[in-house]
Amino acid sequence: MAEVVLYDYWRSSASYRLRIALGLLGIAYRTVPVDLLAGGHKSPAYRQHNPQGLVPALEIDGIMMTQSVAILEYLDETRPGQGLLPNDTLARQRVRALSHVIAMDIHPVCNLGVVRHVMDMATTHGEDPDAVRSEWMAKYIGSGLAGFEAMLAQGPEASQGDFCHGDRPGMADICLIPQLYNAHRWGVDTSGFKRINAIAERCSAIKAFENAHPDHCPR
Ligand SMILES: N[C@@H](CCC(=O)N[C@@H](CS)C(=O)NCC(=O)O)C(=O)O
């Protein structure tokens, strides 16, 4: 079987999603660290793997893939029975909606490239870039997670359980936990998100989530 290779940055939440999923699916892989702070993701060599100059990239089944959520869906479709997404169509819609709150709405505006630009503009306008960054993160992560928390309470009875959807962790949890790590990193107050915090507690007891944590990641 072809080797699985993850082009990864320890603090990248999109990469963190794939580390969790690979762990849950029991797929062994080799990590190639790409240093975002040193600009490794913009090098011509790395752009051969991900032309967007973003992490992650995952080589699997002999193909180089990009876009973490598309990869999660690919893994779900090609490793059936593992349940990253539920089988029922309406349930899949709910899990995708929750996942997209994080991956399509919160994450893009809190990305390194975007936030660096915001900080540069703050400096140009004579403002404290660190303070502007904190305000930015609190606004977008805080309001995004508030919406996520409210959405968790919606849905049929079968969707309500120990995790984002039902009683097993899946794609929405895989998106949530890295975003929560970022929230804590930037000092966003998450204390009011009771359901999110309970889910995070349960995920932290699962090996695949623990092993994928940035603190346990090659740099
Ligand atoms: N939608 C992409 C997002 C990838 C992405 O934005 N990755 C971030 C790290 S989490 C990155 O490489 N940022 C570098 C930059 O903004 O310059 C995915 O889910 O794979």
Image (cartoon, rainbow, N blue to C red):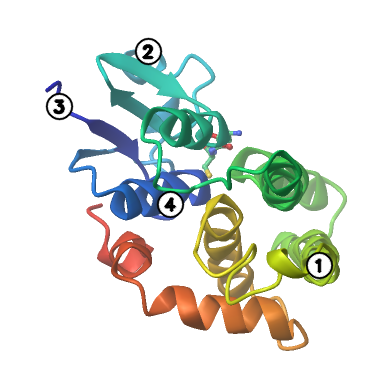
Badge 1 marks a residue whose secondary structure is helix
Q: Which residue is tagged 2? A: 44
Q: Amino acid at mark 4?
A: Tyr
Quadrant hosting residue 35: top left
Instruction: Name the residue that disc number 3 marks.
Output: 3
Q: Secondary structure at mark 3?
A: loop
Residue shown at the point (84%, 56%) measured from the top left: 126
Q: Nearer the viewer, residue 158 or 31?
A: 158
Q: Residue 207 in the image: x percent, y percent?
A: 29, 69
Give how far across and how far down residue 165 sits, in percent: 64, 62
Circles 2 and 1 in contact, beta carbons < 8 Å: no
Beta carbon at label 4 within 8 Å of ligand 1: yes
Please state the quadrant of the image where ligand 1 appears. top right
Relative to 170, does residue 190 appear above or below in the rendering?
A: below
Q: Mark 3 against mark 2, which lies toward the viewer? A: 3
Of pointers 4 and 3, the one earlier in the residue sequence: 3
**Which residue matches tag 1?**
135
If you read the primary sequence from the N terminus, does the residue marked by circle 3 or circle 2 appear first?
A: 3
Residue beneath disc 4:
16
Distance Cα–Cα, label 4 vs label 3? 19 Å
